[in-house]
Image: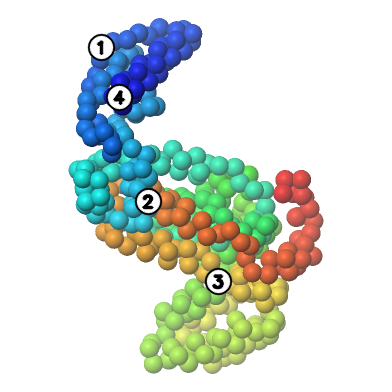
Amino acid sequence: MLKHLLESMLEGELDHHLKESKASGAPNRKNGRTKKRVRSLHSGEFELESSRDRNGTFEPKIVPKRQLIITDELENNVMAMYARGMSTRDISGYVKEMYAMDISAAEISNITDKVIPALNEWRNRPLEAIYPFVFLDCMHYKVRDNGSVRTRAVYNILGVNMDGRKDLIGIYLSEHEGAKFWLSVLTDLKQRGVEDILVACVDGLKGFPEAIESVYPRTQVQLCIVHQVRSSLRYVPEKDRKAVVADLKPVYQANSEDQGYERLLDFDEKWGKKYPLSVKGWMDNWGNLSTYFEYSPDIRRAIYTTNAIEAMHRQIRKITKTKGAFTSDQALLKLVYLALKDIAKKWTMPIQNWGLTMQQLHIKFGDRIKAFGDSL
């Protein structure tokens, strides 16, 4: 019954396709038949026969050309297991145990490939006109490429919208992290509808603030304090690290920018001659390190580090840690996307004290927020 039903539906699909071809002025006709063996969870394995078209333009939707398994339940389970980082071998073993069905790694890959159109549509979707906060950071993975293993940088952009809810607004892939590629990422956000960002939180990558300014000249940049502390400690031997960390705390925990700068001068006086590079990073970047002093403690805690996006990355790594090297760029993006979609299910509530945060943002950026009032 299932065989007869599917073959009848495929025949109807082809007839409809041939009529459309004729109407568009591209004559086409049936050209023999093709067979393939498919498997169903409830009906077992059987041979499915369908007609072909001469022009080769017919793409059936009922049972696509490369689909060999007919069951939504099984495919949904495979997709869920893949999204949680299970290997194709583990998935194959689970399917054999639960469904008494052999399924190859290639078939598992074909099933998970069904998410690719949704991924492409999601990556190109229109975005909101304004985001109060945006966190930008990068992850690195290994991917097999023409017989060798290469590093890939996955660029993620986490936004906080006007309702105070987190929203991952972009995933991009490059061979390495750099301000030049970040510039192309920001340009793409602009093309997808992001007209303004109030505060952008980033790590200490050289040239990053300049890349942001070139696309969003009015955006305030907050460099991650935690990254800056780690960078400072690179030049400090183990014996002095605790003391250096203790003397940096008064700088970034100050009540105001002026107080913080005074304490930075004290830090320079104590450690500058011994560890000049540790102090230089703070001095050179103070303008972007001190942005958060303009805000209340609640907002400061939200923006003084890139912790919001790093916490998301930690969750992704729990899922991807079983992968030594991905088979392709597409396989990497596919798993990261599925993992992020699962993580985003928890982003249902605004961030803490968002009402008070918006009051402050309206006072400071009222004209810019009102400019997009019709689109909010």
Give residue 137's position: percent from left, percent from top.
49, 61
Residue position marked by numbered label 1 in the rendering: 32
Q: Residues within 10 Å of mark 2 (few under 14, many from 20)?
A: some
Query: Helix, strand or loop at disc 2?
Result: helix
In this rendering, position of residue 11 left or right of residue 228: left
What amino acid is found at the position of numbered circle 1 in the picture? Gly
Residue position marked by numbered label 3 in the rendering: 305
Residue position marked by numbered label 4 in the rendering: 1
Query: Helix, strand or loop at disc 4?
Result: loop
Tally the marks: 4
Q: In which quarter of the image is residue 111?
A: top left
Report the Cα–Cα distance between label 4 and label 2: 30 Å
Which residue sits at x=61%, y=74%? 301
Residue position marked by numbered label 2 in the rendering: 80
Badge nearest the viewer, 4 or 1: 4
Work out whether mark 1 precedes mark 3 in sequence or the reverse, and give the earlier one.
1
Work out whether mark 4 precedes mark 2 in sequence or the reverse, and give the earlier one.
4
Q: Is residue 327 above or below residue 160?
A: above
Which residue sits at x=35%, y=48%? 77
Give residue 230's position: percent from left, percent from top.
46, 77
Q: Is residue 155 visible?
A: no
Q: Mark on residue 62?
A: none
Report the Cα–Cα distance between label 1 and label 3: 64 Å
Which residue sits at x=50%, y=44%? 123
Badge nearest the viewer, 1 or 2: 2
Q: Quadrant of the N terminus?
A: top left
Q: Is residue 155 above or below residue 280?
A: above
Q: Nearer the viewer, residue 159 or 118?
A: 118
Most extreme residue toward the front is 1
Q: Is residue 205 above or below residue 374?
A: below
Work out whether mark 1 precedes mark 2 in sequence or the reverse, and give the earlier one.
1
What amino acid is found at the position of numbered circle 3 in the picture? Thr
